Image (cartoon, rainbow, N blue to C red):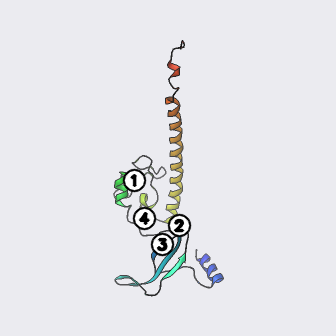
Amino acid sequence: VDYGHAEVTAVFGKDPREYSVLTKEFIGDDEGNLTALVTQDVEITDQGPKAIEGSEREWKADLCVLSMGFVSPEAYVVDELGLDVDQRNNIHAVYGDFRTSSEGVFAGGDCRRGQSLVVWAINEGRGLAQSCNNYLLQKREDETIASRSTGAFANLSSMSPKV
């Protein structure tokens, strides 16, 4: 990563990273698509971040990835879905399968394992996607089999041959 930043600095004349910035507003178009962010520089004080007046900037954007500290999943999500949690209040789902205690709900990354490295989140995201796909394929197959045996003509074989 440092080599990439050095290369961008050489090409554009400055380090592309921005530190001590507070996002104040997300700006969207009439269709709800993100178009920009409004930020303000902050200084770190003993009382926490303090906004620097007159430092607001608008950044064009079509994607925003939120990277925040993590303690555990939001309780209302866990409660509403009726999910089992572990001793740290992370959603219980076995690694590699990623199914939770609620049918059709999967969990991976920080909400399953707790705060960890982004490479684990990427790895679990891929595994979770595969497990979810397998689940949906199996569900479709089960529904197809069920519809064959409960369709309009399913009981014709039990009718008398004289009919």
Residue nearest the viewer, comparing 112 with 58 = 58
Q: Position of residue 144 (x, y in %)?
A: 53, 36
N-term-proximal mark, 1 vs 3 = 3
N-term-proximal mark, 4 vs 1 = 1
Q: Amino acid at mark 1?
A: His
At numbered mark 3, what does the secondary structure look like: helix, strand or loop? strand
Residue annotated with mark 2? 33
Q: Quadrant of the N terminus?
A: bottom right
Q: Amino acid at mark 4?
A: Gln
At numbered mark 1, what does the secondary structure look like: helix, strand or loop? loop
Q: Position of residue 157 (x, y in %)?
A: 53, 20
Residue found 48% across the figure and 83% down from its top: 56
Tell whether label 2 touches label 3 (CB within 8 Å): no
Residue annotated with mark 1? 92
For the residues labelled 3 and 2, the Cα–Cα distance comes to 10 Å
Residue found 66% across the figure and 82% down from its top: 11
> What is the quadrant of residue 63 in the picture?
bottom right
Nearer the camera: disc 1 or disc 2: 2
For the residues labelled 3 and 4, the Cα–Cα distance comes to 26 Å
What mark, if any, has residue 115 been given in the picture? 4
How dense is the environment of label 1, judged by Cα within 10 Å: few (below 14), some, or many (20 and up)? many
